[in-house]
Image (tube, rainbow, N blue to C red):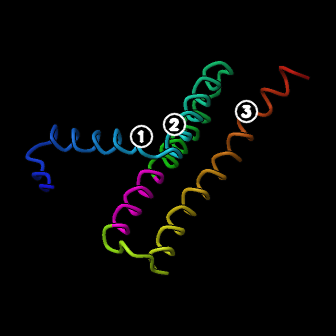
Amino acid sequence: MKPPAPARNFWQSLAFALAGIRRALQNQRNLRIHVTIAAAVLIAGFALRISRTEWAAVVTLIALVIGLELLNTAIEALVDLASPEPHHLAKVAKDTAAGAVLVAAVGSAIVGLIVFLPRLWQIFF
């Protein structure tokens, strides 16, 4: 496979980045799960009329989790390329990258509870 040509301008760089996101969405189940949850959170944010400050936190955390998931995908691909045979350091790299996503996702879920639970409580109780 021929390596891609380096980007010559902003638009090419953007196209390469979007191609990477598209490929990850096609091949990474966990990324699709995170994107689906993010869409649900955004819909809930509009429906529950969260504040601008809450929007800032929610959007930042969505970007963090999805960004880390993309980074995790890149790390896994690089590790597979560098170490096609099983190796304990390859496992450490992959597990640690996945752990970073988990930490961000759990933190995001906690913030989500802080933002949304009081509003949902008012609606249902």
Q: Earlier in the sequence, mark 2 or mark 1?
A: 1
The residue to which callout 1 is attached is 25
- Where does the image place residue 81, in percent across and percent down from the top left? 31, 67
Q: Is residue 51 magenta-colored? A: no
Q: Kindly check if marks 2 and 1 are in contact, taking CB atoms under 8 A apart as contact.
A: yes
- Where does the image place residue 27, in percent across and percent down from the top left? 41, 45
Q: Main secondary structure of the magenta part?
A: helix
**Measuring 62% from the left and 26% from the top, which residue is drawn there?**
45
Which mark is nearer the camera, 3 or 2? 2
The residue to which callout 3 is attached is 116
The residue to which callout 2 is attached is 35
Which mark is nearer the camera, 2 or 1? 1
Task: Tell me where residue 19 sits by quadrant.
Answer: top left
Measure how far apart labels 2 and 1 are at the Cα level.
9 Å
Work out which quarter of the rendered image holds the N terminus and state it.
bottom left
**Measuring 83% from the left and 20% from the top, which residue is drawn there?**
123
**Measuring 52% from the left and 48% from the top, which residue is drawn there?**
65
Give SS at disc 3: helix
Q: Kindly check if marks 1 and 3 are in contact, taking CB atoms under 8 A apart as contact.
A: no
- Relative to 88, 4 lies left or right: left
- Relative to 57, 28 lies left or right: left
In the rendered image, the vertical position of residue 8 relative to residue 56, given as above or below? below
Measure how far apart labels 3 and 2 are at the Cα level.
18 Å
Query: Which span of residues is magenta-colored?
Result: 68-80
Measure how far apart labels 1 and 3 are at the Cα level.
27 Å
Tell me the amino acid under the disc marked 1: Leu
Task: Tell me where residue 13 sits by quadrant.
Answer: top left
